[in-house]
């Protein structure tokens, strides 16, 4: 009976570990550094690299590589675009180009 309980707990634990989504990166693209009200959400991604690539693609498609930049936030609680600063980490890109 004890082995059965232990096996049951291991199965339940592995289910929760296996179903965890890991880190989520969310991107916001600002098309003009001078007007932060104009922005585009790029979506959610499983890695920083994918977030950055999507943001750069948006900047390129909007012809905003010279005047825009992006931010990618990790595990944001209320969304990166809400500016609450509730992300575990935030990375800015294309800011100095």
Image: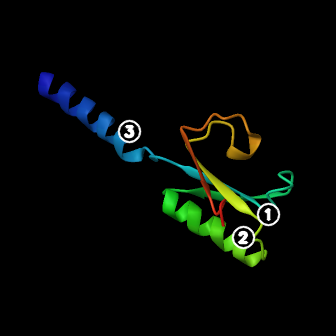
* Mark 2–mark 1 CB contact (< 8 Å): yes
Query: Is residue 69 at all visible to an observer of this figure?
Result: yes
Disc 1, SS: loop
Which residue corresponds to the image point at 56% horizontal and 51% vertical from the top-left?
Answer: 25
Q: CA distance from mark 3 to mark 1?
A: 40 Å
Q: CA distance from mark 2 to mark 1?
A: 7 Å
66 left or right of 8 in image = right
In which image quadrant can residue 45 be found? bottom right
| Foreground disc of the pair 3, 2 | 2
Query: What is the crowding at mark 1: few (fewer than 14 residues within 10 Å), some, or many (at least 20)?
Result: many
Counting residues from the N terminus, which is met first, the one under dot 2 or under dot 1?
1
Which residue corresponds to the image point at 41% horizontal and 46% vertical from the top-left?
Answer: 19
Quarter of the image where the N terminus is located = top left
| Residue 24 position in % (x across, y down) | 53, 49
* Mark 3–mark 2 CB contact (< 8 Å): no
Counting residues from the N terminus, which is met first, the one under dot 3 or under dot 2?
3
The residue wearing badge 2 is: 59
Counting residues from the N terminus, which is met first, the one under dot 3 or under dot 1?
3
| Residue 14 position in % (x across, y down) | 30, 40
Which residue corresponds to the image point at 85% horizontal and 57% vertical from the top-left?
Answer: 38
17 left or right of 52 in image = left
Query: What is the crowding at mark 3: few (fewer than 14 residues within 10 Å), some, or many (at least 20)?
Result: few
Disc 3, SS: helix
Query: What is the crowding at mark 2: few (fewer than 14 residues within 10 Å), some, or many (at least 20)?
Result: many
Which of the labelled discs sits on residue 16, or is there none? 3
Q: Nearer the viewer, residue 85 or 78?
A: 85
In which image quadrant can residue 69 be found? bottom right
Q: How many marks?
A: 3
The residue wearing badge 1 is: 31
């Amino acid at each position: 009976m004890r082995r059965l309980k232990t096996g049951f707990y291991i199965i339940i634990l592995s289910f929760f570990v296996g179903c965890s989504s890991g880190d989520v990166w969310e991107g916001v693209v600002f098309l003009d550094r001078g007007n932060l009200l104009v922005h585009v959400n790029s979506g959610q991604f499983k890695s920083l690299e994918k977030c950055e690539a999507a943001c750069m693609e948006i900047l390129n498609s909007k012809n905003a590589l010279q005047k825009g930049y992006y931010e990618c936030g990790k595990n944001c609680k209320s969304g990166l675009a809400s500016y609450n600063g509730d992300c575990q980490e935030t990375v800015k890109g294309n800011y100095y180009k």
